[in-house]
Image (cartoon, helix red, strand yellow):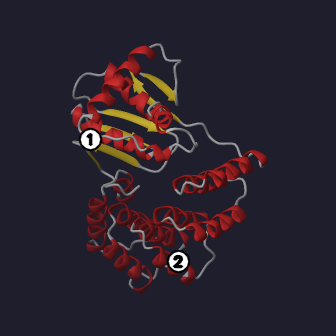
Amino acid sequence: MIGGYTFHGFGREAIMCFDQLVKRGMKPDHDTFTHLLSACSHLGLANERKRYFEIIYSVYGVEPRLDHYSCMVDLLRRSACLKDVYELIKRMPMEPNHGVWGALLNACRICNNVELRKEVAERLFALDPFDRRNYVMLSSIYVAAGHWNEASKVRALMKERDVAGTPGCSLIEHRNKIHMFVVGDRSHPETIRIYLMLEELLRKIQNIGYEPKTEFVLHDVDVDVKEDMIKEHSEKLALAFGLLVTEEGIPLVITKNLRICGDCHNMAKFVSLTEDRVIIIRDVKQFHHFADGLCSCGEYW
């Protein structure tokens, strides 16, 4: 139950469930604390996170594991406390794994720390030189800093090492049939109507403040080209199709095989408001429940 609440972004409910478990005299284990710390991370609850981490061993005799440290690093990096993240990693009684270094690399992106990100990237490459996520993360950091030559070198290294990526796709079910979309997809029988709906949605949400987050386009092209590229992401196409084929008020459920990008996440919030719809997007990390212009993740994802 604690894990289920956490995956759906209901961190406070997860904490309440933990409190009930303790009151009933049940002893939490490693998995319990992993989900609990993840719940704190999703909500950005630094004080609760610190308290729970401290009682893992002192109260319950559970030895902290890498998963617990990863959750701690993840929470600290969401708060952009880069110094605290580094200090925590140095104090770890075991060797940091991919999850720990990956959280620190993302912290480097948030804090725009160019030097440290190189060191962290090298550690990640040493752990797994064929993990595409390491290359994508480093490339996105360079792009955000405007270092296009460095970003191009990372992509060239991916090609040299033949690091294949998983194509992003989004799925939505309608009338017992699964409809799949990829970026820029024009293979669906309803393609014309889908793109017309998408243009209408973009017009509506732009009128109430939506602006495309073009920093998620990892190519050195003009802004207008970036906007054209990002508006055809698979999540947006699945969302437009869902609105076309369902009745008003029916929740839309979309599944993404990768993590949802920041712009698609932002768009879903606006669309949930303009169309008065509940939108649920399950990406590879967690569930996102969009309603009334807000997401259950509270921007911690």
For this view, does 91 lie left or right of residue 19? Answer: right
Look at mark 2 in the image and give the residue it sits on.
Answer: 86
* Residue drawn where x is 35% and y is 50% of the image: 8
Crowd tier of the residue under label 2, counting other residues whose Cα lies within 10 Å: few below 14, some 14–19, many 20 or above: some
Crowd tier of the residue under label 1, counting other residues whose Cα lies within 10 Å: few below 14, some 14–19, many 20 or above: few
Residue 148 in percent (x, y) is at 61, 51
- In the picture shown, does residue 214 fall above or below 245? below
For this view, does 120 lie left or right of residue 233? Answer: right
For this view, does 92 lie left or right of residue 7? Answer: right
Residue type at tag 1: Gly
Which image quarter holds the N terminus? bottom left
In the structure shown, which secondary structural element does the residue marked by tag 1 occupy?
loop
Front residue (pair 25, 201): 201
Residue 230 in percent (x, y) is at 47, 36
Q: How far apart are marks 2 and 1 (CA)?
A: 37 Å
Residue 159 in percent (x, y) is at 74, 45
- In the picture shown, does residue 74 fall above or below 299? below
Front residue (pair 165, 219): 219
Which image quarter holds the C terminus? bottom left
Residue 193 in percent (x, y) is at 38, 15
> Which numbered tag is attached to residue 35?
none
The quadrant holding residue 42 is: bottom left
* Residue drawn where x is 41% and y is 77% of the image: 53
- In the picture shown, does residue 111 fall above or below 209? below
In the structure shown, which secondary structural element does the residue marked by tag 2 occupy?
helix
Query: Hey, which residue is sitting farthest bottom in the picture?
Result: 58
For this view, does 169 lie left or right of residue 160? Answer: left
Look at mark 1 in the image and give the residue it sits on.
Answer: 209
Residue type at tag 2: Tyr
